[in-house]
Amino acid sequence: MPSRSRPVLLAVLSATFLFSLGARASAAETASSELVIIRAGDTVEGDLYATGVRVVIEGVVDGDLTAFAAEEVTISGEVTGSVLTAAPTVKVSGVIGGALRSAASALEVSGSVGTDLVGAAISASLDSGSEVGGDVILWAVDMSGAGTIGADLEGTQRTIRLEGTVNGDVDVSGRRLTITGPLEVGGDLGYRSEADAEGLDQATVGGVVVHKSPLPPNIRIRALGLLARFLAVLGLTTAALLVAWGWPDRTRRAGDQARKQMPTAFGVGALVMLSPVLLGAVAVLLVGLTPAAASLPLLAIFAPLVLATAGLVMVLSLVAGVPAVLALSEVLPGNLALPGSILAGSALVAVAWMVPFVGWLVPLLVLPIGLGAWILSFRTDRESQTV
């Protein structure tokens, strides 16, 4: 039985989708607010990019939907194209004509997805009324599937509960597989687990049932590392789009600085990112040179300062890479709008980050260049005001 349940497949599929969205960004509609809602009876002609605390689709989006929310994305209406979304909670009770790509804490699907579903979640559920026309590839801690899957079911979950219909093969990995009700599998039923599946007598399998041994720990660790990178890219892309929406002119100027003064931006950004280490080194040096009686007061001063500086650098890192991905998007053909440039650049960064052996260089270059470009953009403003 072929096995395509690999984290690299998940990353490549999602990165390709991000790239295709970015290529069409100039013709899309953008909506950003605390609550973005397309009410029942309303239709958005073309693609929609939506960011906010909550994104609610009750009407029709006649195109693709890209939605990032701080709390929830709910689709009870219709999206004729594909959906890319990231939010703590993602609920689909309506109709998606194309594919669904989702990163969420809780993913709930009770409606229909026209083609494939690729997702990463803590909890994922496909209710009894759900229907997915193509493959389902899910990475989740807990997964429950009770609907109809038109092709294969793949992925890695800690606990898997299945019933309903899978027209293709089942190829899943986890600690425990439980058949909770009548299950029809058109192809093979394969699972990788330490324990035997429970409730197999309720399953009707067109092919064979294959119980495979768990993967070695090093393979699992690499797979989790790739998943963590994929989720990090989605989260950072969300933050980048929110920053670009709030400060579009500032974001463009920072991107220009990353393109024009990349070596300088890298040096400035690297110095800022190393500032907690430098402060810690100064603290250790001073403590070593001063009498013992003065050591404690010095530590009381420097310890909070080092921690505060490290926390500030971590917060800045959430949006530090925005100018770098904007500069990277310039290598692509076409004149993309600001959201499209961010999505396209993020897709290229995501693909580079997944490459073995060299992927670790990506954050070491992107974060300092981006952070330095932000700083240089403010310095350029002051210089222009002085002139």
Image (spheres, rainbow, N blue to C red):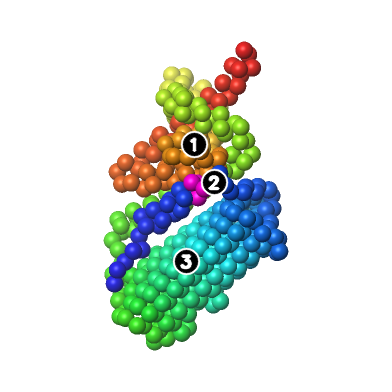
Classify 10 Å Cα crowding around label 1: few (below 14), some (14-19), many (20 and above).
Answer: many
**Marks 3 and 1, how far apart at CA:** 31 Å
- Residue in the image at 57% along x and 34% along y: 251
Residue at point 35%, 83% (across, down):
206
Element under disc 3: loop
Question: Compared with residue 34, is residue 325 higher up or lower down, i.e. above or below?
Answer: above
Q: Is residue 193 visible?
A: no
Can residue 249 be seen?
Answer: yes
The residue pinned by badge 3 equals 115
Q: Residue beneath label 2, please?
A: 25
Cα gap from disc 2 to disc 3, whole angstroms: 22 Å
Foreground: disc 2 or disc 1? 2
Q: Which quadrant does the N terminus fall into?
A: bottom left
Residue 150 location (% of width, % of height): 44, 73
Identify the element where label 2 is drawn.
helix
Amino acid type at image mark 1 = Leu
Residue 252 in the image: x percent, y percent? 56, 32
Q: Residue at x 49, y 36 (%)?
A: 326
**Quick one: 227 or 263, which is closer to the camera?**
263
Mark 3 burial class by Cα count in 10 Å: few <14, some 14-19, many 20+? many
Give the magenta range.
21-25
- Of labels 3 and 1, the one closer to you: 3
Amino acid marked by disc 3: Thr
Q: Say what amino acid the circle numbered 2 marks.
A: Ala
Sequence-first disc among 2 and 3 = 2
Q: Secondary structure at mark 1?
A: helix
Q: Looking at this view, is 99 or 127 the one in front?
A: 99
Of the pair 234 and 318, the residue shown nearer to us: 234
Pick out the residue farthest to the bottom: 201
Q: Indicate yes or no whether the magenta region holds residue 95.
A: no
Mark 3–mark 1 CB contact (< 8 Å): no
The residue indicated by pointer 1 is 326
